[in-house]
C-alpha cells in the first residue's frame, strides 16, 4: 500500500454487520496508519466517567469546572489505563503526534494540566485506551466490509452530539448508514 492509500486523519465507521462489542456502531478517528498497522481513537463511546475523575486520580488542581464535567471516552480496547487527548492543533505539548494541520494527538500530562486550568486546546476529546491493528489487519477488515472510511470532519469529531456521530460520519460521504444492512447470508 503506498502512502497515498493510508487512512491517516480519516474516520472508519463500523458497518452495521460489525458486531464485535468493542466496535459495534462506532466511529474511530485514525491517528496513524502505515505499513506496520494502525492506531485510532473511538470517538462515540462515552466511558462512565468525567474528566474531573481523571483530574482527581492524577492529583491535578482544577479551576475550570466546566472541563471537569467533560465526558471521557472509551477510546478502544488497547491500554485502557492510558489517556489520549485528541485536540485542535496549535500549542506544543511534551508528547504530541501531529495527525493533520488541524488535529493532534497528545499523551502527556501537561495537556491535561492545562485543560484543568482552562489553558488547554480550544477543542479536545479525552479517551482512555485506543484501537489498534497489526500489519495489514485493518486493510483486510475493510476488504471484508467491516468498515466504511470517510474524511475526518472536525465538526463530527468535536461538535456533533455523541449519539449522532455514527450517522453523521457516514453522512459526510452521502451514505445513510441506517439503510445499509448486513448480508443475508452465504450459501
Image (cartoon, rainbow, N blue to C red):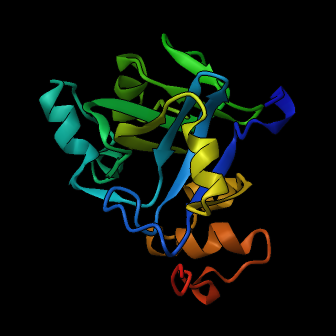
Report x, y in % for residue 165: 54, 68
Report x, y in % for residue 105: 54, 29
Report x, y in % for residue 53: 17, 42
In front of the other: 67 or 33: 33
Report x, y in % for residue 129: 33, 37
- In the displayed structure image, the side of residue 151 where residue 85 appears, left or right: left
Residue at image coords 18%, 25%: 58
In front of the other: 121 or 2: 2
Residue at image coords 49%, 73%: 17
- In the displayed structure image, the side of residue 69 where residue 173 appears, left or right: right
In front of the other: 19 or 155: 19
- Looking at the rendered image, the quarter that the N terminus falls into is top right
Query: Is residue 117 visible in the rendered structure shown here?
Result: no
Check the image and report above or below for 60 versus 22.
above
The quarter holding residue 155 reads bottom right
- Looking at the rendered image, the quarter that the C terminus falls into is bottom right
Amino acid at each position: 500500500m503506498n502512502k497515498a492509500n493510508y487512512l491517516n486523519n480519516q474516520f472508519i465507521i463500523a458497518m452495521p454487520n460489525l458486531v464485535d462489542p468493542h466496535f459495534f456502531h462506532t466511529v474511530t478517528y485514525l491517528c496513524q496508519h502505515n505499513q506496520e498497522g494502525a492506531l485510532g481513537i473511538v470517538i462515540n463511546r462515552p466511558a462512565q466517567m468525567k474528566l474531573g475523575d481523571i483530574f482527581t486520580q492524577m492529583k491535578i488542581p482544577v479551576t475550570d469546572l466546566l472541563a471537569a464535567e467533560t465526558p471521557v471516552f472509551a477510546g478502544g480496547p488497547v491500554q485502557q489505563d492510558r489517556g489520549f487527548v485528541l485536540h485542535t492543533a496549535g500549542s506544543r505539548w511534551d508528547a504530541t503526534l501531529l495527525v493533520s494541520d488541524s488535529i493532534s494527538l497528545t499523551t502527556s500530562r501537561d495537556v491535561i494540566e492545562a485543560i484543568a486550568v482552562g489553558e488547554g486546546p480550544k477543542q479536545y476529546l479525552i479517551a482512555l485506551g485506543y484501537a489498534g491493528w497489526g500489519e495489514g489487519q485493518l486493510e483486510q477488515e475493510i476488504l471484508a466490509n467491516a468498515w466504511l472510511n470517510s474524511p475526518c470532519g472536525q465538526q463530527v469529531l468535536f461538535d456533533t452530539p455523541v449519539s449522532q456521530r455514527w450517522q453523521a460520519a457516514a453522512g459526510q460521504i452521502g451514505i445513510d448508514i441506517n439503510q445499509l444492512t448486513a448480508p443475508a447470508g452465504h450459501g
